[in-house]
Amino acid sequence: MAAKQKGTLKRVLKQLKKYKFFIVLTIFFALITVAGSLATPVFFGQIVNLIIGKGNVNFEKIFIKFIIIAACIAITAIAQWLMNIINNHITYNVIKDVREEAFKNIQYLPLKYIDAHSYGDIVSRNIADVDQFADGLLMGFTQLFTGVLTILGTLVMMLIINWIIALVVVVITPFSLFVAKYIATKTYSLFKKTSEIRGEQTAFIDEMIGNLKVVQAFNREDENLQKFDEVNDRLTKASLKSIFYSSLTNPSTRFVNAIVYALVALTGALMLVFATPLPMAFNVGMLTSLLSYANQYTKPFNEISGVVTELQNAVACAGRIYELIDEKPQQPDSPDALELENVKGEVEFSDVYFSYTADKKLIENLNIKAKAGQRIAIVGPTGCGKTTLINLLMRFYDTDRGTITVDGNEVKEVTRKSLRKNYGMVLQDTWLKSGTIKENIAIGKPDATDDEIIAAAKATHSHNFIMQLPDGYETQIGEDGGNLSQGQKQLLCITRIMLCLPPMLILDEATSSIDTRTEQKIQAAFAKLMSGRTSFIVAHRLSTIKEADLILVMKDGNIIEQGTHSQLLSLGGFYSKLYNSQFAV
């Protein structure tokens, strides 16, 4: 844990290196602030000496001293104001850099990482954890520099005035440091746990809001409230525990500091009362200055202990952010990767092995050969590997072993962009963005003309419902499709593919959200679309794939049967049972 903390701190310092000019500037203003606050007690001590003793009061000198004190306070205030402005600049620019770095890495993370982590936790790291990091960093800049300089400065001033009393202060100081260190060590693990639970809570809220219709449809409101209460209760307990330990820092150090102040007062009083023979002069004014310095000396320990606590929280949060930043991005295309051009659509899987986790095997020794223009249907029970096959085709995942080729080119040796450009995908889940209907259709072909877009919409029977919208093709929709039905959203996705006409198609339950009458029209449109194009069709409704050139029946990651619809029915095997079960009375 200690090594991890040190590693995170090194990363933070490296991040700050970019702003070293501003750091030097903030230290300069911190020096002025401290110098101003250190000068004031000296003049107050001199004022005390000027008013002690009968007939010793000199109003002119006292007035001058007060003018000097007022000037010191004004300079200190201005320096502190400028220092805070610079600290804000450093902190929020560092935070901007961290957020940009984290978000940039998210764009290139492999889907394996995204699928293995909840979206809410990733969001929490990039927002909540970064905010906590900012709070700790800002407090560190604001109070750490001035605190350390104040401690050193007051110690020097006390040594100059009276080294005996200064020695008393130095002897007591380690107790304050020991208390602060013990509590800081304890709070790091507690703050880290709090951040993790906060990420879990954010993930749960994100999931529930995103699927509220499903929650209400299945009357899961009460169960979700119970689940939320359980997570919220754990977060409350973890937060209270971490805050409890961190809150001990200030009163503990204050207690030690009060002892320091009392010992300074007692030692000074004894020296004045008993007039102990010393090698230096000592008077009430000096004692006044020493008491003021003792207070100034101990105050930063309270502030620094608070800073250390906040820094523990900040370091814990920074650790989670850096974990996200350090995640290995997906393997980039090799410099000599080929650009797929003039694709015919011959696709072949040779001895392919793939699993999401090493301990759970999925696809083993898979062999498929799709000729150009063939319609390949993939069927099988849930979890057999159908969608995984699609992910491998598009190279969202890379194979563990074996090869996948397109027109004889290994997909790992071609650019992802050119590979995916040659596929048209229509999935069960719709992909829409905020913008107009026209912009959503033209995602794959931004330079498409209005006539081309309308022709594609007519071919997929979506033109009529689009024209019934308030602004037709210029109607604005949100990323979830707004008030469009699920079937209308799906029609837009199909229209998008019809506009691009890629050489290869992937249809994963593409008509699952469309009514029977519209589906018949879409199937006719698909037949036209698939003509001469290699097509991979994932379907649960087996009636939709009767015309496929080849049907692959998958089970537990393996192809157990393959052939045409009539061939598979005549076998009387798994496909035959699956097909007949859908029409059983």
Image: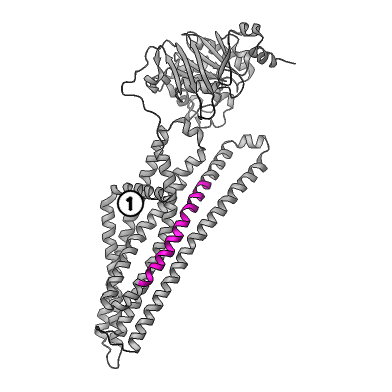
Mark 1 = which residue? Answer: 90
- Compared with 113, 334 (above or below) is above
Q: Position of residue 349 (x, y in %)?
A: 47, 15
Q: Residue furthest bottom?
A: 54
Q: Name the quarter where the C terminus is drawn.
A: top right
Q: Position of residue 71 (x, y in %)?
A: 27, 72
Residues 492 and 408: in front is: 408
Where on the picture, by quarter, is residue 524?
Answer: top right
Q: Which residues are magenta?
A: 171-198
Question: Vertically, is 170 above or below 339?
Answer: below
Q: Nearer the viewer, residue 207 or 6?
A: 6
Q: Position of residue 304 (x, y in %)?
A: 39, 62
Question: Residue 440 in magenta?
Answer: no
Residue drawn at the location 47% of the way across and 67% of the way down:
251
Q: Is residue 468 visible?
A: no
Of helix, strand and loop, which mostly describes the magenta segment? helix
Q: Amino acid at mark 1?
A: Ile
Where 287 falls versus 24 (above or below)? Answer: below
Image x and y of residue 303, in percent: 40, 64
The residue shown at (56%, 51%) is 235
Kindly tell me whether residue 289 is visible in this rendering: yes
Residue 18, compared with residue 385, is above or below; it is below
Secondary structure under the numbered disc 1 in the rendered image = helix
Please tell me whether residue 183 belongs to the stretch shown in magenta: yes
